[in-house]
Image: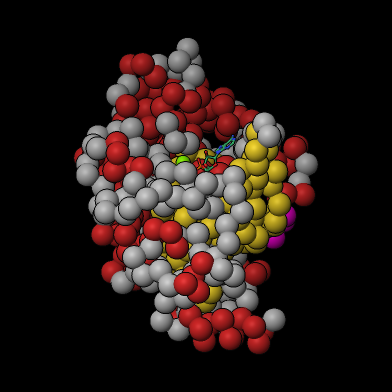
Amino acid sequence: MTARATDPSPSRRTPGELLLDVRGLTVTYRSGRDSVFAARGVDIALAPGETLGMAGESGSGKTTVAMSLLRLLPADALVTGEIRFHGEDLLQANWARMRSVRWAEASVVFQGAMSALNPVRSVGDQIVEPILLHEKVGEKAARARARDLLDSVGVPSRRVGSYPHELSGGQRQRVMMAMALACDPDLLIADEPTTALDVIVQAQILTLLTDLVRERGISLIMISHDLSVLASTCDRIAVMYAGRLVETGPSRQVIGSPLHPYSRALAGAFPTLGDPASRLAPGGLPGDPPDLRERIDGCPFAPRCPEVEERCRSGEVPLLELEGGRAAACLHAPGYDQGRDRAVSRG
Ligand SMILES: Nc1ncnc2c1ncn2[C@@H]1O[C@H](COP(=O)(O)OP(=O)(O)O)[C@@H](O)[C@H]1O
Ligand SMILES: [Mg+2]
């Protein structure tokens, strides 16, 4: 058995108690003549109330995975695998069912969400909309809830009649969070929700977001290129590289003693604040990620890895369960060979 993105210990996790159980998620974009293999066999297991951070440099497939969960990808994306949410495989659900899942059961705060607000409608109207659509409440009760939600995300409730352009960037992002929380979902997916904001505001908003989901028992998948942000806000971390998960485990361990050389590079390379280049390439790493249009043989990180050996370059290097609820896809990770033996004996 290969490993999952959250605590894979079979004694603690049975599929029945998972909120989200993703298996073998594969996403291929078929644009023009080329196919882009953007997610390659991703497994994620998320318990109710659990917070999972997904890290990885630009282009590693984080947004692809996040958007695929609620089937928000463009039509040229071919998605296979299983996305079990409350036990139901969302890849088999029809569009009517998907519309009822979105907002009410699971919601997304997008990357660059600030431009997603409608400029000609008040923020109150925009928060009220999903509530009226998904719940049997009247206009008045929905509006009262919109005020409460604004308060809880730190925007004065008197701003309920304001238009997006009358608010700061940070306030607009808080409004997006209020919308995402409006129908009390079980899962919130936040894709680099604060990247466009200044650093102090980013930290405040991310801390607020994790506090809000904890209070409400909502599970969170939070995506960021910045491992340090995730470490301080999430229970567990999953590191993505070239469309695969290369390491997962409790946040403190992944940051403090990373098992995969790519996680080590990310953990050692806290981005230079405000420097857009450091988003794209973690400091000190030579070379570029592989071309996702190509088949990758062996470990995808091998061409850039300071510890590469010949045997890294051929054959599969799957993500395997190791000790302590951790998992890694590296031949050099302590216990990897034993993990492989266990995987083989379990079939
Ligand atoms: N609509 C699309 N069509 C074709 N390729 C895409 C599309 N969206 C993303 N990609 C490609 O998929 C890969 C993963 O992108 P993405 O999921 O956005 O990564 P991340 O969020 O980690 O930066 C990249 O190589 C990107 O160019
Ligand atoms: Mg992205």
- Pick the quarter of the image with the N terminus: bottom right
124, above or below 99, in the image? above
Quadrant of res 178: top left
Quadrant of res 29: top right
269, above or below 100, in the image? below
Q: Where is residue 79? Give x, y as percent.
A: 69, 47
Q: Is residue 69 visible?
A: no
Q: Where is residue 166? Give x, y as percent.
A: 33, 16
Judged left or right of residue 205, residue 59 is right
Residue ranking furthest to the top: 120
Which residue occupies 42% across, 44% down? 58
Q: Where is residue 44? Give x, y as percent.
A: 56, 61
Which residue occupies 51% across, 84% down? 337
Q: Where is residue 43? Give x, y as percent.
A: 59, 62
140 vs 91, nearest the viewer: 91
Q: Which residues are magenta?
A: 85-89
Residue 225: in magenta span: no
